[in-house]
Amino acid sequence: MSTQPEISDSGAPAGALVFLRGEKGADFAEIHSSLLLQDGVAACIPMLGDWNILLRLAAKDRESLKRLIDERIRSVNGVEAFEAHYCEETWTASSGDGVEQKAAACAVLDVDSGSLAALVERLRATAGVTEGNVTDGGKKMVLFLRGNSSREIRNVLGGEIRPLSCVLRIKLLNAMNFQ
């Protein structure tokens, strides 16, 4: 089972974030190693919860990225399902005090694409948000968050991001670690 939005190929360098779930009883060390060795895999991040691994992919264009997912990622033994988010814009946060934080998470947001520019500016200044990726035709965003605890991350999502009128839905995905 996979979830992939329709994409168009502009010929520009392309990136994607792919959430993977392994089959019950799968050897996750082997899956992780197999994925990390694939051309185009920039990072392979262990996750907790609904998904087991988050991949950062890079390719010369969208068509190459789609082939990478369809031919290489899909064929890795032990992968049960995946969800791909093709990145249209990636930004880093302007906030942060340089203090190492212990907890990490990703959040997939359904957003009102008409308010995207204002939302990106607001999120860039939100403490705890380290990076964001506009995906799926501007209808979704994937955020990377850090905090001193999972509770702190949930408080940022619930207290600062959820009340924004252009945020329609938030799905929190806990990460074990990411660079």
Image (tube, rainbow, N blue to C red):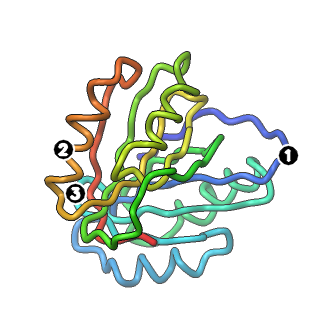
User: Which disc, if any, is residue 11?
Assistant: 1
Q: Nearer the viewer, residue 104 or 7?
A: 104
Q: Quadrant of residue 5?
A: top right
Q: Secondary structure at mark 2?
A: helix
Q: Is residue 121 above or below residue 112?
A: below
Q: Is residue 61 left or right of residue 144?
A: right
Q: Secondary structure at mark 3?
A: loop
Q: Do the CB atoms of the residues marked 1 and 3 lie less than 8 Å apart?
A: no
User: Which disc, if any, is residue 49?
Assistant: 3
* Cα distance between the residues tagged 1 and 2: 40 Å
Q: Nearer the viewer, residue 53 or 145?
A: 145
Residue at image location 53% in from the left, 40% down from the top: 4
* Residue at the outermost right position: 11
The residue carrying mark 2 is: 155
Dot 1 or dot 3, earlier in sequence: 1
* Cα distance between the residues tagged 3 and 2: 19 Å
* Residue at the outermost left position: 151
Q: Do the CB atoms of the residues marked 1 and 2 lie less than 8 Å apart?
A: no
Q: Amino acid at mark 2?
A: Asn
Dot 3 or dot 2, earlier in sequence: 3
Q: Amino acid at mark 1?
A: Gly
Q: Is residue 25 above or below residue 71?
A: below
